[in-house]
C-alpha cells in the first residue's frame, strides 16, 4: 500500500484524502495545524492516521501533497525538507505555479512535481470537502526540464486514482491560462458583488432582484480571502495583464453602444456563445461530451423520483443530474445526462410517454 501524506486537510486536501482512501490502495496520513480539521479528517475517512506535526507525518511517505495556501506551501517545504525519505516525491495543489515550482525545486529538485486541480469550492475547510470532487476534473501538472520522469509518473498515477484527468503544461503557461479562466473571474465576481452592493445602498431592493445570472456570476465571491490573497500575490502580473485586456474589451463594447452599433454588440454575443460551446463539460473533463435531456418537471412531491424511476425502468444509467432552474409553485427544469446518445434518445422517449416535456440538448 502506498503511503500518501497530505499537509492541509481543507477542501482540496480533505477531498484528496477521501478519494484516495476510498480506493483501498493508499494509506493516507493527514497533517494539519488545526485540531478540528484533524478530528474531522479521522472521522470522515479523509485520513487513516492524523498528526499536527508535519515532520513526523511525512517521515514514512512515498508521496507528499502540500495542500495549504500558496504562501504556506513554500514555507512548509522548508519545514519538511530534511524529514522526507530519500525516494519520496513531493507535489502541491496550489492555484499558481511559477513561483511555487521555482521555490520547491530548490528544496526537492527533480522529485517535486507542481500540480493544480481545476476543481474546488467556495466553502472553506474540510467541511467543503467531497470524495468525488476530483472525478473527471482536469488536474494540471507542470513538469519542467528538471522534473524526474519517475516522479512525474508517480504523481500522475496517484492523481488519476482520484478520478481526475491529467493535463501537463509549463508553469508559466499555466499561470497565464488560470489568470484568464479562474483568477480574473474571481476578481470580476468580487467587483460585480461590490458594484451591486453600491447600487443597493441607494436602492435597497437591488439584491432582491439578483436572480440566476447574478448568482452564477458571483458564487466564487463567497470564497475565503486568505486563499485568494496568496493567489493574487503570486500571479499579480498575469492578473493585471488579463484585467487590462478586459478593460480594453469593455471599452470597445461601450464605444459600440454609444455609436448605437448594436450589430457589433450582437456579433460579440454570438462569438461568446460559440466559444462557450467549446468548453468541455465538467462532468466529463477531457472526455467526449455527455448526452443530455432537459426535463420540465411539475412542482409536486415525487416529481424527481418519477423521472429517475422511469429512466431506471429502462436500465439506463444517469451519469450526471442537475436541477437547472426552480420556479417556485411552477416546477422547474432538470438536466439528466447519459454516456451514449442512444441512451439519451430512449430516456427522452420514455419521459415523453409519461407526459413530461423532455428535449435533447
Ligand atoms: N478551494 C479551491 O477551490 C481550490 C481549488 C484548487 C486549488 N486550491 C489550492 O489548494 C490549496 C488549499 O486550498 P483549500 O481551499 O483546500 O484551503 P482550505 O482553507 O479549505 O484548507 C487549508 C487547510 O490547511 C491548513 N493549514 C493552513 N496553513 C497551514 C500550515 N502552515 N500548516 C498546516 N496546516 C495548515 C488549514 O488549517 C486548513 O485545514 C491552496 O493552495 C489553494 O490555492 C484551492
Ligand atoms: O469553486 C469552484 O467551483 C472552483 O472550481 C474553484 C476554482 C475556479 O474554478 O476558479 C478556484 C480556484 C482554483 O485554483 C481552482 C478552481
Image (tube, helix red, strand yellow):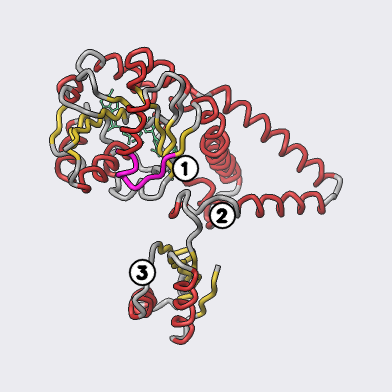
Task: Point out the image quarter for the C terminus.
Answer: bottom right
The CB of the residue at mark 1 lies under 8 Å from ligand 2: yes
Find residue 103 and report its horizontal and vertical position in percent.
Answer: 40, 15
Label of residue 317 in the image: 3
| Cα–Cα gap, marks 3 and 1 | 31 Å
* Residue 160 sits inside the magenta stretch: yes
Q: Residue furthest left?
A: 49
The CB of the residue at mark 2 lies under 8 Å from ligand 2: no
* Element at label 3: loop
Residue drawn at 33 percent across, 80 percent down: 313
Q: Residue furthest right?
A: 259
Q: Is residue 355 visible?
A: yes
Direction from residue 39 to residue 359 in the image, left or right: right
Sequence-wise, the earlier of marks 2 and 3 is 2
Label of residue 213 in the image: 2
Label of residue 285 in the image: none
* Residue 226 sits inside the magenta stretch: no
Residue drawn at 21 percent across, 48 percent down: 22
Q: Quadrant of residue 118?
A: top left
User: Mark 3 or mark 1: which is in front?
Assistant: 3
The magenta segment is 158-166
| Cα–Cα gap, marks 2 and 3 | 30 Å
Q: Identify the residue position indicated by label 1 in the image.
A: 220
Q: Residues within 10 Å of mark 1 (few under 14, many from 20)?
A: some
Considering depth in this image, is 45 or 264 the residue closer to the camera?
Answer: 45
Amino acid at each position: 500500500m502506498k503511503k500518501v501524506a497530505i499537509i492541509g486537510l481543507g477542501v482540496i486536501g480533505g477531498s484528496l484524502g477521501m478519494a484516495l482512501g476510498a480506493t483501498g490502495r493508499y494509506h493516507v496520513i493527514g497533517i494539519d495545524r488545526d485540531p478540528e480539521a484533524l478530528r474531522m479528517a479521522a472521522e470522515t475517512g479523509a485520513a487513516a492516521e492524523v498528526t499536527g506535526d508535519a515532520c513526523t507525518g511525512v517521515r514514512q511517505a512515498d508521496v507528499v501533497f502540500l495542500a495549504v495556501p500558496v504562501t504556506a506551501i513554500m514555507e512548509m517545504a522548508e519545514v519538511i525538507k530534511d524529514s522526507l525519505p530519500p525516494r519520496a516525491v513531493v507535489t502541491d495543489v496550489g492555484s499558481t505555479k511559477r513561483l511555487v515550482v521555482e521555490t520547491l525545486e530548490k528544496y526537492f529538485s527533480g522529485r517535486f512535481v507542481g500540480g493544480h486541480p481545476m476543481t474546488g469550492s467556495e466553502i472553506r475547510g474540510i467541511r467543503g470537502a467531497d470524495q468525488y470532487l476530483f472525478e473527471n476534473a482536469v488536474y494540471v501538472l507542470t513538469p519542467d526540464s528538471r522534473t524526474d520522469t519517475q516522479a512525474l509518473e508517480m504523481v500522475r498515477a496517484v492523481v488519476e486514482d482520484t478520478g481526475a484527468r491529467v493535463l501537463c503544461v509549463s508553469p508559466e503557461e499555466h499561470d497565464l491560462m488560470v489568470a484568464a479562466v479562474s483568477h480574473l473571474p474571481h476578481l470580476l465576481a468580487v467587483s460585480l458583488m461590490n458594484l451591486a452592493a453600491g447600487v443597493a445602498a441607494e436602492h435597497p431592493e437591488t439584491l432582491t432582484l439578483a436572480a440566476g445570472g447574478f448568482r452564477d456570476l458571483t458564487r466564487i465571491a463567497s470564497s475565503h480571502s486568505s486563499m485568494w490573497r496568496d493567489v493574487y500575490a503570486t500571479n499579480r502580473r498575469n492578473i493585471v495583464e488579463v484585467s487590462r485586456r478586459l478593460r480594453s474589451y469593455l471599452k470597445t463594447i461601450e464605444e459600440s453602444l454609444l455609436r448605437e452599433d448594436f450589430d457589433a454588440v450582437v456579433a460579440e454575443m454570438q462569438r461568446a456563445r460559440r466559444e462557450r460551446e467549446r468548453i468541455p463539460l465538467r462532468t466529463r473533463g477531457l472526455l467526449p461530451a455527455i448526452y443530455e435531456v432537459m426535463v420540465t418537471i411539475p412542482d409536486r412531491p415525487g416529481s424527481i423520483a418519477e423521472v429517475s424511476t422511469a429512466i431506471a425502468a429502462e436500465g439506463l444509467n444517469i451519469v450526471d443530474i442537475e436541477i437547472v432552474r426552480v420556479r417556485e409553485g411552477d416546477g422547474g427544469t432538470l438536466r439528466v445526462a447519459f454516456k451514449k446518445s442512444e441512451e439519451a434518445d430512449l430516456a427522452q422517449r420514455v419521459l415523453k410517454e409519461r407526459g413530461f416535456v423532455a428535449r435533447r440538448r
